[in-house]
Image (cartoon, rainbow, N blue to C red):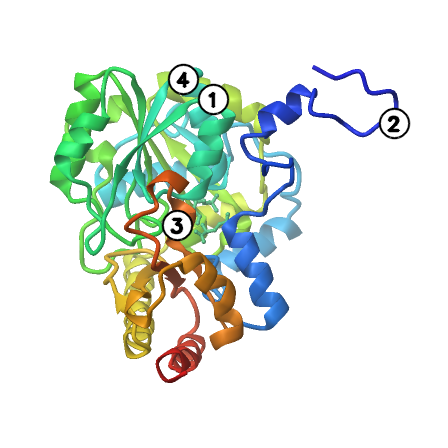
Amino acid sequence: MRGTNGAGASPSGSWELAARGALLLGDKGELSPTIFAEMSALASSTGAINLGQGFPDEDGPAEVLEAARQAISEGVNQYPPGLGMPVLREAIAAHQERFYAIRVDPATQVLVTAGATEALAATILALTEPDDEIVVLEPFYDAYGGLAALARARLVTVPLRAPLFQPDLNELRSAITDRTRLILINSPHNPTGSVLPRETLELVVELAHKHDALVVTDEVYEHLTFGVEHVPVASLPGAFERTITISSGGKTFSLTGWKVGWIVAPERLLKPITAVKQFLTYVNGAPFQPAIAVGLGLPDEYFTTAAATLARKSGILGAGLREAGFEVSSPQAGYFLIADASPLGITDAADFCRALPALAGVAAVPVTAFVHPDRRDGYRSLVRFAFCKRVDVLQRAAAQLAVLKTG
Ligand code: PMP
Ligand code: GLN
């Protein structure tokens, strides 16, 4: 409700909007940038190599870029259909069958979204009531906390601890109860690079049945695994009917700025999600949609090479960080690795990350940014580095980080 400010007066705390936003604004109502935006801004103001925010520094496949150019030239520039362009919905359905033997109806079980972020937003807003519980693995991707706050839902967390970052199955069992509405799984996982094994996912499905919860699975790094299998939750027996699968073209095709994502879910769940989605963005990215469809149809070699290239880059950066004195985890997938700075005498990674651009000309993100302030013990000295960068950039970063050991 609007307060009693006169026309032209600045908004006061009596605005309902401000009260709602207070969950996301700072104590004094200030807009704080996300940790990714903060560290990217710091990297660009200092000229540091940006290993903070996870975005590649090379373009995606030429065929996909060309398809978007062609779509623009051919006039694919107006609103696409609300569910997404049929060519893309069909490509998503074909992709699920080709890689995972999951058969879905592109007309009723696939929804195109503005990135995985909108898919998560529409899902959480559509399927939770205030005070419903959403179980997440912690550390968690920052949007999960923000979106739960917007929905007035409660996050219940299951910790992932170094060095393997896998959940304790008893902790998982006790976090999921009859109050749980959504179990939000992110595998491969950001920020830790861990991949949940089949047995853990089977337990998630069993607990979802037992407590009548739904499973939301964020699989944006599905193709970027390093010698381990990615198992989509929806492929497990008895899972599809209660699973909302979310992915996006951003990571798979190194096109994070295109923001073309999607949801695959049974029609009864997709309908309320679509109802919300149509009032978030309605639609997005017309010329990018047929281009992502081209990407999803690329030969297997594209997908295996993308993963192998990243695995190699992870090795290059990991070796540099070890050389500089960090203790480094070996990620099983994704764009990121976790380095423990405690052998360098660092106890507060957040302060360290603010100083790192000046110290070594490299930007990174503290893992505490992905953890609730009350539960940061065990994460305080951990730093997330992105390795989705050119090899020469990673080599330069590794050389610069060596100053930490000697300096
Ligand atoms: N989920 C996870 C785990 C992510 O890491 C990201 C982005 N890096 C997203 C969702 C958002 O994806 P998109 O850019 O497609 O909205
Ligand atoms: N997902 C990216 C990361 O984890 C960041 C995306 C964003 O800035 N919101 O680095």
Cα distance in 3D space between marks 3 and 1: 23 Å
Q: Residue at x 40, y 64 (%)?
A: 388
As displayed, is residue 25 above or below residue 229? Answer: above
As displayed, is residue 272 above or below residue 144? Answer: above
Cα distance in 3D space between marks 2 and 4: 36 Å
Residue 402 placement (x, y as % from top left): 38, 81
Residue sitting nearer the eye, 209 or 346: 346
Label 3 vs 1, first from the N-terminus: 1
Residue pointed to by mark 2: 8
Mark 1 and mark 4 residues within 8 Å of each other at the beta carbon:
yes
Task: Please rate how many residues cluster around mark 2, counting C-alpha atoms within 10 Å: few if below 14, some from 14 to 19, many from 20.
Answer: few
Residue sitting nearer the eye, 106 or 321: 321
Label 3 vs 2, first from the N-terminus: 2
User: Left or right: 8 with respect to 278?
Assistant: right
> Would residue 367 be seen by someone viewing this image from the given angle?
yes
Cα distance in 3D space between marks 1 and 4: 6 Å
Cα distance in 3D space between marks 1 and 2: 31 Å
Single out the residue that lies furthest toward the right. Answer: 7
Mark 4: which amino acid?
A: Asp
Mark 3 and mark 4 residues within 8 Å of each other at the beta carbon:
no
Mark 3: which amino acid?
A: Thr
Residue pointed to by mark 4: 131
| Secondary structure at numbered mark 3 | helix
Q: Residue at x 34, y 62 (%)?
A: 306
Cα distance in 3D space between marks 3 and 2: 40 Å
Residue pointed to by mark 3: 368
* Mark 1 CB within 8 Å of ligand 1: no
Residue pointed to by mark 1: 152
Q: Residue at x 21, y 23 (%)?
A: 208
